[in-house]
Amino acid sequence: MATIELLEDRIAELEKQIYGLAKKNETNDTPPESPVIDTLLHVNTLVSSALSGREKATLMTKRLPELNNYLDPIVESLEIPMEAKVQLLLTMAPEIKQNYEMLKQVHELLPVLETDHLRDVPELTNKLILSYLKLYEDSQELNSRIIEVLSKYNEVITSISKSLITIDAVVTAAEIAAMPKKQLD
């Protein structure tokens, strides 16, 4: 219990330094209504009650230090031997050089990208959209005219087809009537 009391005393001292009288008069910060230790104990109680009966969550919290070690970049750099790091850099060297050359080229072409023509693109975009809408409306009108003409063409072709069918029927009937009749014995 001595370590907990020592910890409580240290946190209380920190609270006094942060929310002391000198600091309180200078700013509008108000000291916390409850000490940090009480809040920490309350949070610990809430977490413990939330984790009780949940095996997977309990196992995960037990492994948090191990997970933190995996996330620590210093640990990762210590595990990889220096030769492997050198080999990795050597294999990536052509790609790094290519990226450097491309970046250098972009810096060289930067003045071209900053021309007035490219700066006016937002204004010209609106003009382009308006002209596109005008062309779209014109094309819709033309499409409706074309559909109307095709529909009339279809009607004419249909009437011609019907006339040809009627003519064919009449010609067939005339041919049958003109045939010599065979006499039956």
Image (cartoon, rainbow, N blue to C red):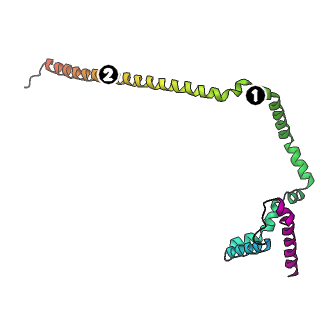
Residue lying at 79% horizontally and 29% vertically, measured from the top left:
110
Q: Are marks 2 and 1 in contact (CB under 8 Å)?
A: no
Where in the figure is residue 73, as x and y percent of width and height? 85, 57
Quarter residue 156 falls in: top left
Q: Amino acid at mark 1?
A: Leu
Q: Is residue 154 left or right of residue 36?
A: left
Magenta span: helix, strand or loop, mainly? helix
Query: Which one is nearer the viewer's eye here, 30 or 75?
Result: 30
Name the quadrant of the N terminus: bottom right
Using the image, tell me which numbered label, if any, was put on residue 113. Answer: 1
Name the quadrant of the C terminus: top left
Q: Is residue 93 left or right of residue 128?
A: right
Q: Is residue 11 above or below residue 124?
A: below
Name the residue furthest right. 82
Residue lying at 83% horizontally and 59% vertically, measured from the top left:
26
Badge 1 marks a residue whose secondary structure is helix
Q: Earlier in the sequence, mark 2 or mark 1?
A: 1
Pointer 2 local density, CA inside 10 Å: few below 14, some 14–19, many at least 20: few
Using the image, tell me which numbered label, if any, was put on residue 30. Answer: none
Using the image, tell me which numbered label, if any, was put on residue 157. Answer: 2
The stretch of residues the image draws in magenta is 1-26
Quarter residue 71 falls in: bottom right
Q: Is residue 104 above or below residue 182?
A: below
Where in the figure is residue 54, as x and y percent of width and height? 67, 74
Residue lying at 79% horizontally and 73% vertically, measured from the top left:
37
Q: Amino acid at mark 2?
A: Ile
Residue lying at 68% horizontally and 73% vertically, measured from the top left:
50
Badge 2 marks a residue whose secondary structure is helix
Query: Which one is nearer the viewer's eye here, 62 or 128?
Result: 128
| Separation of residues labelled 2 and 1 (CA atoms) | 59 Å
